[in-house]
Amino acid sequence: MAYEKIPDSVIEAVLRHHDIVDTVGKYVQLSKQGKYMKGLCPFHSERTPSFTVTPEKQIFHCYGCGTGGNAIKFIQEIEEYSFPEAVKVMAQEAGIPFDWTAADAAPSPADLEREKLIEAHELTAKLYNYLLKNTTHGQQAMAYLRNRGVTDKQIDHFNIGYAPREWDTLVRFLDQRKFDLALMEKGGLIIAKNDGSGYVDRFRERIMFPLWSREGKTIALAGRLMGEGQPKYLNSPETRLFNKSRNLYNFHHARVDMRKHRRVVLFEGYMDVIKAWSAGVNNGVASMGTSLTEEHAALLQRNVDEAIICYDGDNAGMAAALKTIPLLEKTGLKVQVAVLPQGMDPDEYIEKHGANAFMREMIEHPVSATKFKLIYAKKNHILLEEEGRKDYLLEAAGIIAALDSPIEREIYLKDLSREFDIPIEVLKQDVFHHREKSYKMKPQRDKNDNWWNTGRNENRRVPNTPAIPQAPPVLPAYQSAERRLLARMLQDAEVAQAVHDKLGDAFNVEDHAALAAYLYAYYAQGHDPDVSRFIALLQDDRLERTAASILMTEDNFPFDEGLLEDFIREIRKVPLQREIERKREEMVRAERSGDMLLAARIGIEINTLERNIKQR
């Protein structure tokens, strides 16, 4: 949605009320290091913290992925809001009055397309739901759902529908409502015919599940076949609305319960989420046609502290759970697994044993991630045979050896000792050898790493080992000069005016020149230096990142007129140096072609340019 210009006073009030450390600290565990606060970046996966918050300047910046800005920008990124949406939410939280509304001015073409696509998806979901419940087309589908134990309440809550077998039901529906069919094809709802003569429906003869954004808007669809055939599930393609690696099914419904209880239950399929919801699992989500990704894990980490994996009880489901565990643990989440009987999925378990048994036996009593790994390992060995028992015990020792806690290792070793009648001291020897081998194989640079997590659990650190600081990238002299000059200009209006008079927009890096231009205009409007406020006015993702990165430059060096002139001189050299390089290439070409007179003339021009550089 387009908005009227948000008053500067509202933006300033929001930034004053929302301290950057408090804002970020709700999502990231921060640790004080000098005048900075550091933690693991919530926007990409990392083991060593590169995410830095500067309370003095009220900004954040990640040296790993480059994300940076002020408190508003952080909320934009973490919650995937637009700038106006972020300001509005933060203003509401702070009790700051706001009165801007949807603008009369025409929204941008991109905004219009997005709004049209969302409108079309919302109408499509309603159409399929209507066809399921109210027409002869949907009778077979309704019978199928009834046979699966799906109730009217579930159909309404999850807006389940049916796409009929006809080729153009949705095409005609959208065309009659004056939707641009080319845009609808771009949005993944319909498909262009190979001969270019028109369009056909993407989904036909399938049970339909709307897929929602985090705000609850329909942004894609998934269709399930009722009989045999492939693919069993067909999802919308990735579009400007829908990214399967970042969206989770039912997230917008589950989010309130997730945040309240700080726990999420992960399922493999849409039907599992739906049936579990009726069993009382209000915090259930599922990935959309893909394995869980790092983006999914990061999204969950921002909302919960614990994750219960409830995948199918067959070999494929257990293997998927085993793959998901380290992905979640990497973000700092506590991970447990609900172990279903062999070959049974959550939907089937609920049908056979009932909702109460599912909650009591599966959800309320999951096993630890380590226990699950041991269960999975045991399935791969024939324990009735001596060789099978031996191989399992060796594998189990390796699993237990990976635990950091001596207490946890002791508990699992005692269980193994009792189960197989093996002295615990013997098992400990194998665990010790595993840990010793792992330590020797660990790269030297890792031995002094900090151990962090971005969850709300305690951060851990190897005792008496200092953190290894990250080496900043080495920049060309002129780029370093431009960044240090801009860092000073952002905090000193007089320096900005001097640079304006002496250099203007002659920065060599495009983003630096753009920042300087915005900064000149900012001060010309009578604003005082305020880096957080300046970043808020940019509303350009790339420039916000660049500004935040520049502001992380160490700027406590002595600055005077002489240094200012040195920086400007270094910046002005670059066009001449580039011209010299171009001339040298011309001279080489002239020499190769035998035109020595031209080569000599170019050589004189190069000498003149080099003298000009020395005189600057």
Image: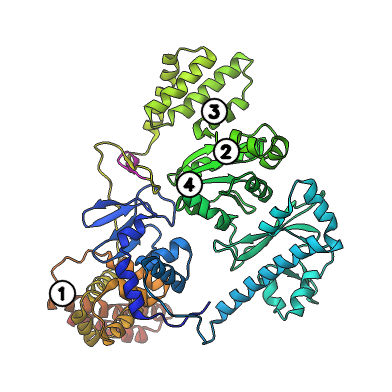
Mark before the other along the chain sequence, 1 or 3:
3
- As displayed, is residue 556 above or below residue 449? below
Q: Amino acid at mark 4?
A: His
Circle 1 packing at 10 Å, graded few (<14), some (14-19), many (20+), is few
Q: Secondary structure at mark 1?
A: helix
The answer to whether residue 229 is seen in the rendering is no
- Mark nearest the camera among 2 and 1 is 2
Q: Amino acid at mark 2?
A: Ile
- Say which residue label 1 marks: 563
- Say which residue label 2 marks: 363
**Magenta stretch in the rendered image:** 445-452
Looking at the picture, the colour scheme in use is: rainbow
Query: Is there a contact, CB below 8 Å, between mark 1 and mark 3?
Result: no
Q: Secondary structure at mark 2?
A: helix
Query: Is there a contact, CB below 8 Å, between mark 3 and mark 4?
Result: no
Q: Residue at x 51, y 22 (%)?
A: 394
- Say which residue label 3 marks: 374
Q: Amino acid at mark 3?
A: Leu
- Say which residue label 4 marks: 261
Q: Nearer the viewer, residue 355 or 419?
A: 355
Mark before the other along the chain sequence, 1 or 4:
4
Q: Residue at x 26, y 80 (%)?
A: 572
- Mark nearest the camera among 3 and 4 is 4
